[in-house]
Image: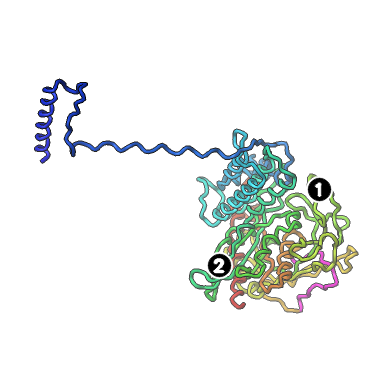
């Protein structure tokens, strides 16, 4: 058929050529249009596509620059500080600042540059043209950092090739956040920002990067049909990081409570009765000002209110003492003399009675910012918006109370054998054979006379992994003033106090209290084997502590969860 078709087409072509010749030419100027057979050859090409629409007009922009001369915050001054790189106990010689080493190893070294580019591009132009746009950007970027940290710890975010630090590490969140607050502090847009607006941008970035806006408790039943039980738990930043600019090993500290929070965020567990425990977590700073400003109450308060998403258990967690989980029974209202990560001290040595308030403008430690918040002082005074009364303007002994108490299922947690199967880290000691000891921690210290600086201490019961005789436990006398709770008088105790006070303010019957986990900052020494290297970011002993602490901490949280099936 194909051959015949070509023959016929050839004959027609000869005929057309003859006719054209007879009429005087082959394509002439006399208007002749040759007849072309249809249905043969390739179809004509399709018409060209319409041109693309013009790009939308560029949005408004503003000029911007970087003010590298602006005074950095105390924590930001540690960004350039290395670990010891010479002398005794040093094997490595890396002089790179530790913050850079950690964020690069974990793949978080892109966050601060990306944030910088969004705030002010290479040409000195930004699409952020107002405070409201800046506020939206910092909250988005902070939330992205939080999710990335959770995803890395929970195994959903890949580490760079050659990474040495395990997914469980919590430190990249802290150091990346500080890199980004420095970027934000140095940002100098062409439009005006008031001091309060600059402070607000830093505050909102802090809150969003700590998971405090990420909490979303479920209501009703889980997809499998089991009723939801809702828990919120908190962890802390790393702390005791040494003086800015001075090489020291404190820089490499981790905080297993923060690592636990990252591991637990968004997790769901089936409880013994088939109900589902849903956990949300957040991170708290190791500095007094954010607490005094109400950061913790603002995070928890919306979930303490009545409604279908009201929290069923609220647990605070921090790092405490060696090789033991302390379940704190009493929390004191008092601040001790320890400095925060920002170097600030709220109750410095000197006049340290509970009613003492620092005068505005006071500098409590060399190189730190002055006191700017009314009511900053030796006693904890939460904001009126959550207490319902003003405890800041005028100190009152019992408003809020000097001590609060835990409502945890102590017996189930202490005797639950949560350490079974958990490998004890090298050099760790406990009375049990596996994991760490757990004790109901019932100690505290008080001022018998709130106007006299003499204090009295009540020791804990000393019983491990069992509940003590009731005669060994004496509650605080309500006529006294707190000097410390079972967890001391630093920010761990403060987080416990504010959490349990909020429970009482709302009058809800839920498990609430504080778990002090063992200290994890234990590197190899001559006594524990391995090679000591003060220039190392990590070693196997350090990692073994985190692994064991987080594993047993999760089991203690599960014991709290299982207590909810009786409610």
Q: What residue is pinned by disc 2?
A: 421
User: Magenta: predominant secondary structure element?
Assistant: loop
Where, quadrant-wise, is the C terminus in this rendering? bottom right
Residue 11 vs residue 283, the one in the foreground: 11
Label 1 packing within 10 angstroms: few (<14), some (14-19), many (20+): some
Q: What residue is pinned by disc 1?
A: 370
Most extreme residue toward the right is 452
Residue 18 lies in what quarter of the image? top left
Residues at marks 2 and 1 touching, judged by CB atoms closer than 8 Å: no
Numbered range of the magenta stretch: 471-486
Percent position (x, y) of residue 145? 59, 50
**Distance between the alpha carbons at the discs numbered 2 and 1:** 49 Å
Percent position (x, y) of residue 500? 72, 68
Residue 14 vs 379, above or below: the answer is: above
Label 2 packing within 10 angstroms: few (<14), some (14-19), many (20+): few
Point out the tag, 2 or 1, that comes first from the N-terminus. 1
Q: Can residue 522 be seen? A: no
Residue 304 vs residue 347, the one in the foreground: 304
Asked if residue 482 is among those painted magenta in the image, a careful observer would answer yes
Asked if residue 315 is among those painted magenta in the image, a careful observer would answer no
Is residue 333 rendered to the left or right of residue 83?
right
Q: Can residue 196 be seen? A: yes
Circle 1: element type = loop
Residue 406 vs residue 506, the one in the foreground: 506
Is residue 155 rendered to the left or right of residue 212?
left
Circle 2: element type = loop
Residue 126 vs 386, above or below: the answer is: above
Residue 28 vs 121, above or below: the answer is: above
Q: Residue at x 63, y 75 (%)?
A: 412
């Amino acid at each position: 058929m194909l051959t015949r078709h070509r023959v016929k087409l050839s004959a027609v072509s000869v005929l057309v050529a003859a006719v054209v010749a007879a009429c005087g030419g082959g394509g002439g100027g006399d208007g002749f249009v040759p007849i072309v057979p249809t249905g043969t050859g390739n179809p004509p090409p399709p018409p060209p596509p319409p041109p693309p629409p013009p790009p939308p007009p560029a949005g408004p922009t503003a000029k911007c620059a970087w003010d590298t001369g602006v005074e950095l915050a105390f924590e930001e001054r540690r960004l350039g500080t290395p670990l010891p790189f010479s002398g005794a106990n040093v094997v490595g010689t890396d002089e790179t600042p530790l913050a850079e080493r950690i964020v690069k190893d974990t793949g978080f070294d892109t966050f601060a540059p990306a944030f910088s580019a969004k705030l002010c591009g290479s040409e000195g132009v930004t699409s952020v043209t107002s405070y409201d746009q800046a506020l939206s950007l910092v909250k988005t970027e902070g939330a992205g950092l939080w999710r990335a940290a959770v995803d890395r710890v929970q195994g959903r975010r890949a580490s760079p090739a050659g990474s040495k630090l395990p997914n469980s590490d919590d430190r990249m969140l802290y150091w990346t956040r500080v890199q980004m607050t420095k970027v934000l502090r140095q940002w100098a847009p062409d439009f005006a920002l008031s001091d309060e607006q600059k402070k607000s941008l830093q505050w909102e970035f802090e809150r969003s990067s700590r998971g405090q806006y990420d909490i979303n408790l479920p209501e009703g039943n889980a997809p499998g049909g089991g009723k939801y039980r809702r828990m919120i738990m908190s962890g802390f930043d790393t702390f005791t990081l040494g003086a800015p600019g001075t090489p020291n090993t404190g820089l490499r500290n981790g905080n297993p409570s923060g690592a636990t929070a990252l591991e637990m965020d968004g997790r769901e567990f089936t409880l013994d009765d088939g109900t589902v425990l849903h956990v949300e977590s957040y991170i708290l700073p190791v500095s007094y000002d954010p607490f005094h400003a109400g950061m913790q109450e603002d995070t928890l308060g919306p979930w303490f209110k009545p409604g279908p998403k009201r929290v069923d258990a609220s647990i605070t967690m921090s790092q405490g003492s060696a090789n033991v989980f302390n379940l704190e029974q009493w929390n004191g209202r008092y601040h001790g003399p320890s400095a925060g990560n920002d170097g600030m001290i709220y109750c410095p040595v000197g006049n340290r009675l509970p009613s003492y308030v620092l005068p505005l403008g006071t500098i409590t430690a060399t190189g730190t910012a002055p006191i700017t918040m009314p009511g900053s002082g030796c006693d904890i005074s939460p904001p009126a918006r959550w207490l319902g009364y003003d405890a800041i303007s005028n100190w009152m002994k019992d408003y809020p109370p000097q001590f609060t108490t835990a409502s945890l299922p102590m017996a189930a947690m202490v005797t639950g054998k949560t350490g079974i199967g958990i490998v004890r880290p090298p050099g760790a000691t406990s009375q049990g054979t596996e994991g760490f000891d757990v004790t109901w921690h019932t100690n505290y210290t008080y001022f018998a006379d709130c106007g006299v600086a003499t204090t009295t201490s009540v020791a804990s019961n000393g019983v491990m992994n069992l509940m003590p005789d009731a005669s060994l436990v004496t509650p605080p006398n309500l006529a006294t003033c707190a000097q410390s709770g079972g967890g001391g008088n630093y920010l761990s105790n403060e987080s416990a106090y504010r959490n349990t006070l909020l429970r009482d303010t709302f009058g809800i019957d839920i498990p609430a209290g504080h778990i002090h986990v063992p200290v994890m900052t234990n590197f190899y020494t001559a006594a524990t084997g391995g090679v000591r290297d003060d220039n190392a970011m990590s070693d196997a002993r350090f990692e073994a502590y985190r692994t064991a602490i987080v594993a047993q901490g999760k089991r203690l949280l599960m014991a709290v969860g299982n207590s909810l099936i009786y409610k």
